[in-house]
Image (cartoon, rainbow, N blue to C red):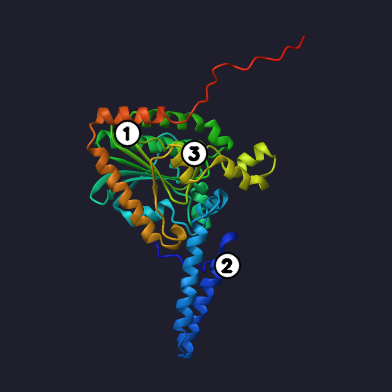
Amino acid sequence: MAKKNNSDATYILPFEREIVALQRHVDELVEAQTQSGRDYSTEIRSLREDYISLLTKTYADLTAWETVQVARHPKRPLAGDYIEGIVKNFVELHGDRYFRDDRAIRCGLGSIGTEKVMVIAQHKGRDTKERLECNFGMCHPEGYRKALRMMKLAEKYSLPIVCLVDTPGAYPGVGSEERGVAQAIAINMMEMSRLATPVVVAVIGEGASGGAIGIGVGDKMAMMQYAWYSVISPEGCAAILWRTGEKAADAAEAMQVTAQSMKQHDLIDDIIPEPLGGAHRDTDEAGYNLERYLVSSIRELKRVPVDQLVEQRYKRWRRMGKVLQLDEAPQPANTK
């Protein structure tokens, strides 16, 4: 994994200002103690206890919008970081054999733990150059077709498939629409529903719209603790309902985008715990938790006969959502 990111990073979440101030105070005392030789250990210990206490309290009661902000933290580990950290002997495969290679989706063969897998992951990019190459994680239709090509390859050799979801949505540009992005997503959903091999899906950051579901149909569906998952981004929902993105926080609460809400409504199976204060504070621990979940899920699914696995997957997705039925439909008012 990439090196651990401390909370003194230049980017500060709005609700973390007091936490960051405490951490900086601790760092200043440690530096002063080193330079002057004076003993500040008592003060440092007390401040660190206050820091942990405040961090624990803050992250135990995040709002839906604050969770969205954590999922978008620029220091949060991306798919590429997880691939580098937990996928051994990764061999990347490219192209959809129709148009081009979409860098927003990374696909390849490798091993997670002792399990040989096909990895399909949405990658946003870390620096400006890479973000432009990856289109900020917004996939084009060729990305979904590349993903499907790799899924079929995995099915041919009975390899489990691991999908890591992290996207603000599929790219809605003119070229993307001309090349059939909606159809590409729909075909992926159909084909993934009947793949004769285990499929494990994890939302590691943002899981928005059809962009997420295009690689998100599986036997097991999990979310990282501070990821979010929804049919539309909070800003997009706010723009539709209130005609302004300033209502994004209200939209996030109404849509119940958090992992806890998704689990409560039976839209996901599991929540993968993150380090205290989010994955951006300890990428190694976040990677370990993700790896442990993926390995245990793959081993569990491999014990199920393929025919039964596909049937269970179908039933799982059919049972999603709840419909309210009225015994008697309301009668129209008498206009005479």
Q: Position of residue 25 (x, y in %)?
A: 53, 76
Estimate the spatial distance between the alpha carbons at disc 2 and disc 3, rounded to whole Å. 35 Å
Check the image and name the residue furthest to the right: 336
Q: Position of residue 229 (x, y in %)?
A: 49, 42
Mark 2 or mark 1: which comes first in sequence? 2
Label 1 sits on residue: 152
Three-letter amino acid code of the residue under disc 3: Gly
Mark 1 or mark 3: which comes first in sequence? 1
The nearer-to-camera label among 2 and 1 is: 2
Closer to us: 50 or 303 = 50
Label 3 sits on residue: 211
Q: Residue at x 48, y 50 (%)?
A: 124
Three-letter amino acid code of the residue under disc 1: Lys
**For residue 18, which numbered disc appears in the image?**
2
Q: Position of residue 212 (x, y in %)?
A: 47, 40
Three-letter amino acid code of the residue under disc 2: Glu
Q: Is residue 108 left or right of residue 32?
A: left
- Label 2–label 1 contact, CB within 8 A: no
Name the quarter where the N terminus is drawn: bottom left
Above or below 173: residue 135:
below
Q: Secondary structure at mark 1?
A: helix
Q: Position of residue 107 (x, y in %)?
A: 37, 44
Above or below 17: residue 114:
above
Mark 2 or mark 3: which comes first in sequence? 2
Q: Residue at x 36, y 56 (%)?
A: 287
Q: Is residue 283 left or right of residue 55?
A: left
